Image (cartoon, grey):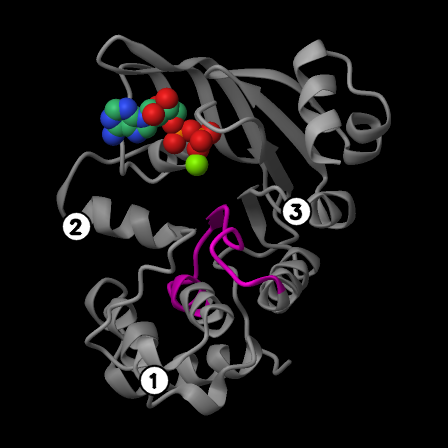
Amino acid sequence: MTEVSVAKEDVAATGDLVVLKSVNKHFGALHVLQDIDLTIARGEVVVVIGPSGSGKSTLCRTINRLETIDSGSITIDGKPLPHEGKELARLRADVGMVFQSFNLFAHKTVLENVTLGQVKVRKKDKKAAEERARALLDRVGVGAQAEKYPAQLSGGQQQRVAIARALAMEPKVMLFDEPTSALDPEMINEVLEVMQQLARDGMTMIVVTHEMGFARSAANRVVFMADGRIVEQASPDQFFSNPRSDRAKDFLSKIL
Ligand code: ADP
Ligand code: MG
């Protein structure tokens, strides 16, 4: 991989980057996030697992304000989430998000996908933005696809473009919501390898995934959610060898 700096923050900097305090969220009568307390340190890689419907995606979406919360607080780098406008656009750039379904702009080339936000939100000039985009595309192994449209790429390639697009914004933290769930099995590893490399480079990451191999090798901490609550959290070693709650034991017995 070519050398290109991906994180906005110096990885040597310390402190808590993402802090959720007593966060509650309802969808109508459904209490989807219940008193969530979660602190993510700079450079930490946290894997979030749990049964379908437990609130993992909603948790991710609240962190870059794709969903609002009903009570509690969320801060990034000590600052509360902005509500609207340019501030919100900058927050979304600071908090890179990679979805299960890639979400690339279908009518833009790969290069344009990775250049656009840099120009619009980060106010870079087009040439510098394209240079960074090409370096990042090389880094995730799709440099040769720069002039193509998303539909001309495999799922694994599209997801790597989506990662490059988020990284282009020099995010403080990257959120991944089941980034490999929609991929054919043979493409899962090429995406996980890019994520592993990012983790090694010191990126702060919150990763919702069922890929337990990734959790074991890349995560500093596993957070287990069920029914809108964080039921337990531990190091991967501890969690996988000795889950404490019945919910976690039951979940692990089904997926391992
Ligand atoms: P997970 O990602 O862990 O599968 P989600 O955060 O997607 O869980 O969903 C948690 C619960 O909230 C589920 O019961 C889901 O059906 C519900 N939910 C998610 N998004 C919405 C929404 N926009 N409106 C109503 N209910 C929702
Ligand atoms: Mg989900």
Identify the residue at horizontal 44%, vertical 25% (top origin): 53
Q: Residues within 10 Å of mark 2 (few under 14, many from 20)?
A: few
Q: Which label's residue is closer to the chain start, 1 or 2?
A: 2
Question: Which quadrant is home to the N terminus?
Answer: bottom right
In the rendered image, which residue does mark 1 sit on? 130
State the SS at label 3.
Answer: loop
With respect to residue 118, does 226 lie above or below?
above
Distance from Cα at disc 3 to Cα at disc 1:
33 Å
Task: Pick the quarter of the image with the C terminus.
Answer: top right
Residue 87 appears left or right of 190:
left
| Residue for badge 3 | 211
* Label of residue 152 in the image: none
Question: Where does label 2 land, which residue?
Answer: 86
SS of the residue at dot 1?
helix
* Left or right of residue 196, residue 33 in this image: left
Looking at numbered disc 3 in the image, what kind of residue is underneath it?
Answer: Glu
In the figure, residue 155 lies in which quadrant? bottom left
